[in-house]
Each structure stands twice: as structure tokens, then as C-alpha cells.
Image (tube, rainbow, N blue to C red):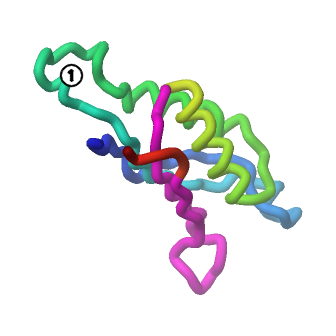
Amino acid sequence: MDTVYVRGLQVDTIIGIHDYERAHRQTVILDLELGYDIRAAAASEDIALTLDYQAISERLCEFIRGSEFKLVETLAERCAALVREEFGVSWLRLRLAKPDALHYAEEVGIVIERGDRA
């Protein structure tokens, strides 16, 4: 299995449990690793056979901007489900970071893996 990746996707959203977090949009940063066999696309140079990371990124940005979750765990799960269901990705690793969530840490976040990497 090959890996297509997107790193540092930044999106503003409402995220958090505290009132002050819900009053202002915050930036979250996503890193995605997507399991996909690239051989057919590479052999033919046919864009239709690729995993469209631009479409995935744009769809995630649209979804995240419109969301208002309390937990980064929920946002990560929903993003993973969206990518797997809408783009037919069988395996992914998603890292979701929330910069400046703690004044003494650069960022906090979560890393999840979903599906089979076969």
C-alpha cells in the first residue's frame, strides 16, 4: 500500500468545551496519511486514477469550517469518516492539532488510524 499525504492543512473552526473557546474561531491543523495504490495512475498518468488530495483537502476545510465540536476527538473521528466514506480511502492516519490550546505547549491534539492498511 502506498501513502498519499497532506501536511499542515490549517482550518479555522469553533472547537472546545470552555465558553471562551466557543466565542472565537480557532485554528486546527491536520496531517493526513491516506492508503492508496498509486501504480495505475503512475503507469497511465491518468488523473482519474489518482487520489485527489486537493478535493479531499477542500472538502475537509468546508466540513471543519462549518463544524462546532467540543472535543478534538469528535472532530478527528468525523473527519476520518468523511474521507473514508466520500473518497473510498480504505486506511488513513489523521493527526489533528490544536495550537495554543495550552499557554505552555506549542500544541495539543490527537492521532488516529482507521481502516486496514493491507
Q: Position of residue 22 (x, y in %)?
A: 82, 56
Q: Which residues are magenta?
A: 88-113
In the shown orientation, is residue 26 left or right of residue 2? Answer: right
Residue at the spot x=59%, y=71% of the render?
Answer: 108
In this rendering, the answer to whether 12 lies above or below 57 is below
In the shown orientation, is residue 67 left or right of residue 12? Answer: right
Helix, strand or loop: magenta stretch: strand
The quarter of the picture where the C terminus appears is top left
Write down the quadrant of residue 52 in the picture: top left
The quarter of the picture where the N terminus appears is top left
Residue at the spot x=15%, y=25% of the render?
Answer: 42
Nearest to the observer: residue 26 or residue 2: 2
Q: Position of residue 41 (x, y in %)?
A: 21, 22
In the shown orientation, is residue 116 left or right of residue 50? Answer: right
In the shown orientation, is residue 42 left or right of residue 92? Answer: left
In this rendering, the answer to whether 98 lies above or below 80 is below
Nearest to the observer: residue 27 or residue 4: 4
Residue at the spot x=39%, y=29% of the render?
Answer: 54
- Please identify the residue farthest to the left as the structure is shown: 43
- Please identify the residue farthest to the bottom as the structure is shown: 104
Total numbered circles = 1
Q: Position of residue 11 (x, y in %)?
A: 56, 45
Residue at the spot x=40%, y=47% of the render?
Answer: 117
User: Does 90 appear in magenta?
Assistant: yes
Mark 1 residue element: helix
**Within-10-Å neighbours for mark 1: few <14, some 14–19, many 20+:** some
Q: Which residue is mark 1?
A: 41
Amino acid type at circle 1 is: Ala
